[in-house]
Image (cartoon, rainbow, N blue to C red):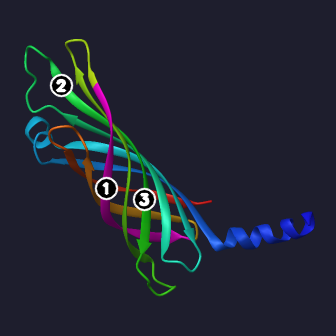
């Protein structure tokens, strides 16, 4: 049984594509109250992708950091920026393309946990952890056998009492096959 498991391992690995990626870009606040309080910011992301061979569906896990500077810092609160950390799980659908194609368009969407922290120069910072959802589209560009770049945009909606926080990160980065 051990010998059969060892012999089957390379075949099983060949059936599933696993990629690790890092990137960053611009984050655009949308909808009140976020758009009213902060300027366009920036983001950093790290992700892990799983795609079974022969299937257009896969899964992606993301860790993201967003930072938005306040439009104006009130003297009384000293609020100067919002930081947003998130961990999401997404289903990814890659559109079928010819095997020699170097560009792979995809759609993705899912949900996760978001921590929003309003940082203040006047001392205490307010923090809240909430559930949210996201959906978007992107392109993977193959550079070499196990190296590629990606460009994607997503809409995130974080469920906050009163009015949801909404933003669109547009990110680019590099992915490595493992």
Q: In the displayed structure, would residue 156 be above or below residue 12?
A: above
Q: Could you say which quadrant of the image residue 11 lies in?
A: bottom right
Comparing 108 with 27, the one in front is 108
In the rendered image, the residue lying farthest to the bottom is 98
Tell whether 153 sits left or right of 103: left
Label 2 – label 1 distance at C-alpha: 26 Å
Secondary structure under tag 1 reads: strand
Comparing 153 with 115, the one in front is 115
Residue at x 10%, y 23% (from the top left corner): 73
Q: Which residue is mark 3?
A: 90
Q: Which residues are magenta?
A: 127-144
Q: Tell me whether the residue at label 3 lies in contact with that at label 1, contact meaning CB atoms closer than 8 angstroms.
A: yes
Q: In the displayed structure, would residue 117 be above or below residue 91?
A: above
Look at discs 3 and 2 and give the one toward the viewer: 3
Residue at x 41%, y 76% (from the top left corner): 103
In the rendered image, which quarter contains the C terminus? bottom right
Q: Which residue is mark 1?
A: 134
Residue at x 42%, y 72% (from the top left corner): 93
Q: Tell me whether the residue at label 2 lies in contact with that at label 1, contact meaning CB atoms closer than 8 angstroms.
A: no
Tell whether 153 sits left or right of 47: left
**Magenta highlight on residue 136:** yes
The disc, 2 or 1, on the residue closer to the chain's N-terminal end is 2
Q: Residues within 10 Å of mark 3 (few under 14, many from 20)?
A: many
**Magenta highlight on residue 171:** no
In the rendered image, the residue lying farthest to the front is 161
Secondary structure that dominates the magenta span: strand
Residue 80 shows which numbered tag?
2
The disc, 3 or 1, on the residue closer to the chain's N-terminal end is 3
Q: Residues within 10 Å of mark 2 (few under 14, many from 20)?
A: some
Label 3 – label 1 distance at C-alpha: 8 Å
């Amino acid at each position: 049984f051990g010998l059969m498991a060892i012999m089957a391992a390379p075949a099983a690995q060949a059936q599933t594509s696993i990629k690790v990626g890092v990137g960053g870009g611009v984050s655009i606040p949308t909808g009140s109250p976020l758009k009213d309080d902060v300027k366009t910011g920036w983001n950093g992301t790290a992700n892990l992708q799983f795609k079974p061979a022969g299937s257009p569906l896969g899964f992606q896990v993301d860790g993201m950091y967003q930072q938005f500077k306040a439009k104006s810092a009130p003297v009384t609160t000293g609020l100067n920026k919002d930081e947003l950390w998130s961990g999401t799980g997404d289903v990814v659908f890659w559109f079928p393309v010819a095997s020699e194609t170097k560009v792979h368009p995809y759609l993705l969407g899912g949900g996760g946990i978001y921590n929003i922290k309003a940082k203040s120069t006047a001392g205490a910072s307010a923090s809240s952890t909430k559930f949210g959802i996201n959906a978007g589209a992107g392109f993977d560009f193959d550079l070499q056998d196990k190296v590629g770049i990606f460009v994607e945009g997503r809409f995130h909606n974080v469920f906050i009492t009163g009015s949801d926080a909404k933003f669109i990160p547009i990110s680019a980065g590099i992915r490595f096959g493992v």
